[in-house]
Image (tube, helix red, strand yellow):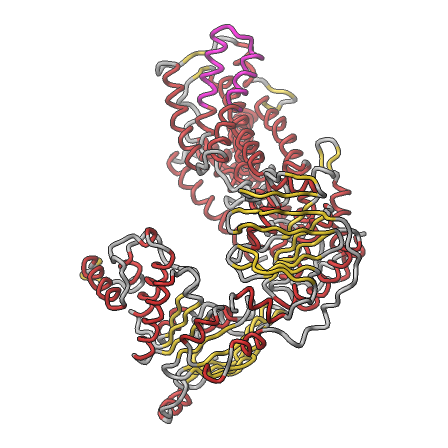
Amino acid sequence: MTTTTETGTDAPVAPKRNYSVLFALTLVGLLLLLCTGLAIANPIFLSELNITNLLRQGSMIAILAIGQTFVIITAGIDLSVGAIAGFSTVIIAMLLQAGVAPWLAIVITLLVGLGIGIFHGFGITRMGLPPFIITLATMTSLRGIGLLMTKGSTISINNTTFTDFSTQSFLRIPSLFWMVILVAVPAYIFLDHTRWGRYLFAVGSNPESARLSGVRVGRIVFMAYALSAFFAAFVGVLLATRIGIGNATQADGWELQAIASTVIGGTSLFGAIGSIHGPLIGAFILAVINNGANLLNVNSFWQRIITGFLIIVIVFFDQMRRRGR
Amino acid sequence: MMTAPTATATAQATAPADQPILELRGLQKNYGPVQALKPASLAFRRGEIHAIVGENGAGKSTLIKLLTGVIRRSGGEVLLDGAPVALANPEEAIAHGINAVHQEVVLCRHLTVAANVFLGDEQTRYGLLRKRQMTRDAQRILDDMGFNIPAGAMLGGLTIGQQQLVATARATVRGTRFMIFDEPTAYLTRQEAAELFTLIRRFKDEGMTIVYISHRMEEVFELADRVSVLRDGTLVGTRDIADTTETELVSLMINRTLDQIYHKEQIPRGAVLLETRGLTGKGFRDISLSVHAGEIVGLYGLIGAGRSEFALSLFGRHPAAAGEIRWKGQPVRIRDVNAAIGLGIALAPESRRDQGLNLNLPIGLNLNLPVYDRITFGPLVAAREEASRADRQIADLAIKTPGRRTLASSMSGGNQQKIVIGKWLNHGAELFIFDEPTVGVDVGTKAEIYRLFAALLKRGAGIILISSYLPEVYELADTLHVFRGGRMAGTHRYRDAADEVVLAEAIGVE
């Protein structure tokens, strides 16, 4: 079959094929360059303790970024993921305090997250609200609800099997990073090898064309936001194991770190362009920058400046190359 | 494009009094292999009202865009007062005093009328806007033109017709010498149209040259001094209004030298596939028609006549408000697109860019979009099946591409249209609706698309062919329905009426 496609190759186009691979390699190269530089500058960087710490730091943002990617591929945005994570620590802490079995507490928390995501889908597809607005609204109100539920205090988690999870390692790799793999592999299969993944891209590229091709656009939008919120609730559970408390003000600003990771990973905010590996690498580039800044005693304010600068540079080059095609 | 300044100076110095204000010499525009405007030469006389008529897609808007600097020409030259001008961008055209009032109002709805009139040309003092002054001046201009429009009102609150008049006022404050009106009365009431005509005549008396583009013959004969006819991107003739008739103009607009590409095959008509009775929805009223297997039903009319709205409604995008649809004799309700697809209806929509394609995605994904529910293996997409289906369509339709991974955006118009069609061939359907399938498509691809129609018919499918290009529907359709203003204005069997009659029905000439 493929031989017959060569009948006419005079179309003035460049094949897309190698581009995404090249971009991913560039990102990996950047990550390695950062690591090498830091290892030379400060040998502590390569210590097992530091690497473990770095992986834990990066893991939660990475999972948020994967969820965010689904939404951004549909040309939407989810500003609420940080708030959902913080809120989820409250939910699970209260459930554990009430004596609910950990597995059940986790399931309930995840379902609450899913519910929030479905609410987003409802607001966007049924009420016609822009994604930015509906998720901005939940972002602020969830923090308020969480604080109301705890009356502004912090709930500590006394279940040690639960809190020990975050400090454990398997095959010398921290459990939190295993969670990234647990999420990323199905997410990759979902995005690249199921028809729902194809539909996400189609909706992000041109919802009208997708609809006229028989794609149920509303359902796909629901799905994207439900997944993002679900992943955020999962991050909330992981965060609760790590800090051992429930507090609605936790995970402050993580939504922006997740969006930054996604964008650094080559996802287009205009939709229809994105991958799973990109945001993963993006999240760990940010984690290495933060870690390195701490090690080198760089004023933490600089971390933010460097992050902002990096976003501009990477996205600018990405845009330039896309346009050059 | 620019010639030596010395030539310009001498040309101006020796300009005779009756020299044309604007002259086109072999002006042309190509989009890839598609000739939107074939080399055209035409001289506009100073102070005349010059009408330009032609079917949709005849090249009128291309000509306007060239003259107003919106697009750049592919060849030829334009002489203003005998001196060549580049018209490289809209600013330059405006600086030369060339201005246009477009069919669609391109103003800011959220600003006041006065702000719109002076947009880009604001009066300021110490860097601050002189709002009250501008409102007063705008009001004076509007009153002077005889428009009853408050200058302080928000533009968005006005009717489309009033907005059009504001656009006219706006064009005049910029020292316009050469004004183009593109179908200005499309949205105007009778009263507003009369006001506009009075104004246009006054502009003429003040020495302005007017180009007036319209479908409406009665307006052309009421207003114009001369008329030029465009057909298929060719300027086919210019007449003095006094020396011509509606009949002559209509016959000029119609392509008499039909291309070889239309050859209609006789295919036996089968059972009724689809029937509508009194179907009414947004943009169309009381449409009753039927489509048989093996038959092409043509829907002809001007843009905005309600044909595409009818098609989208049949396809479940905007379900009809009243009336009945029968599918193979059974009454059905088509509530959404998936219901239509489920019945076996396919739509290649009017706008490839906005409705037909996911441009920044690969060709393969576009081709398979309607069939992903069939090519999954468990939860996963069957990659080999996905690839082979895409490759089959690319081969069958001879889509010129390096491969299925190429983005749809990088393809030419003809190849993009093939992708839109291919996606429904891949899916399979019994009724194919093609809405303007050959717009922006080169002649070779056109012929391929027509051959494809025949192949579909032989397989027992029915086709609804929507086109603004009369030769296409006239030569291909077994049954031809003419739409005008959302209603059916006429129905003909293959070649039982002259093409002039069909065109006259669509335009509304008796």
**Residue A105 position in % (x across, y down):** 54, 13
Say left or right for B234 vs A146.
Answer: right
Seen at 41% across and 64% down, the residue is: B185
Seen at 29% across and 52% down, the residue is: B154
The residue sitting at the top extreme is A99
Q: Is residue A189 above or below residue B172?
A: above
* Viewer can see residue A30: no
Q: Main secondary structure of the magenta part?
A: helix
The residue stretch that appears in magenta: A86-114
The residue sitting at the front extreme is B510
**Residue B420 position in % (x across, y down):** 66, 53
Res. A207 image quadrant: top right
Number of callouts: 0
Q: Is residue B209 above or below residue B296?
A: below
Say left or right for B201 vs B216.
Answer: left
**Residue A23 position in % (x across, y down):** 59, 47
Res. A324 image quadrant: bottom right
* Viewer can see residue A8: yes
Q: Is residue B187 above or below residue A178?
A: below
Res. B504 image quadrant: bottom right
Classify the position of the C terminus of chain A by image quarter: bottom right
Q: Nearer the viewer, residue B382 or B453?
A: B453
Q: Is residue A110 magenta?
A: yes
Q: Nearer the viewer, residue A155 or A298?
A: A155
**Residue A323 position in % (x across, y down):** 54, 56
Seen at 27% across and 60% down, the residue is: B148
Q: Is residue B388 above or below residue B19?
A: above
Say left or right for A248 vs A181.
Answer: left
Say left or right for A53 vs B163.
Answer: right
Q: Is residue B467 magenta?
A: no
